[in-house]
Image (tube, helix red, strand yellow):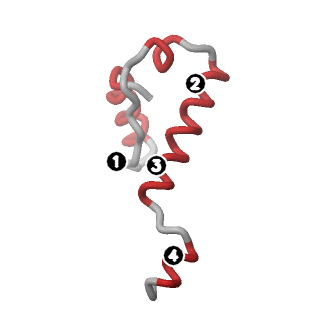
Amino acid sequence: MTERFVGLAEATYESRRLPGGPMIVMPPTEETEYSEPATMARISDEAFARFLETMVVPRAAAARAGR
């Protein structure tokens, strides 16, 4: 989502008893704000994949590190 939807997302999380739930906030651009749903889905999927690559240690690397 973009910054203008953060308040709505926070209210939705609270109503579902998930206050402080995780979210990825995208920078507001022409593409992230006004694209067709399929384009926004692609952008979201790509952002989430990059997040996972950054934040999650692959299983093989974790095994080598003794985790």
Residue 2 is drawn in which quadrant?
Answer: top left
Q: Disc 3 to disc 4, how far (Cα)?
A: 17 Å
Residue indicated by mark 4: 61
Disc on the earlier residue, 2 or 1: 1
Amino acid type at circle 1 is Pro
Amino acid type at circle 3 is Phe
- The quarter of the image holding the N terminus is top left
Q: Position of residue 24 (x, y in %)?
A: 41, 39
- The quarter of the image holding the C terminus is bottom left
Q: Which mark is residue 51?
A: 3
**The one of 63 and 15 positioned closer to us in this rendering:** 63
Residue indicated by mark 2: 40
Front: mark 1 or 3: 3
Amino acid type at circle 2 is Met
Give the structural element (helix, strand or loop) at label 3: helix
Instruction: Decide: is 58 above or below 53.
Output: below
Q: Residue at x 47, y 68 (%)?
A: 57
Instruction: Decide: is 59 above or below 33.
Output: below
Residue indicated by mark 1: 19
Give the left or right position of residue 7, taking residue 53 as reference: left
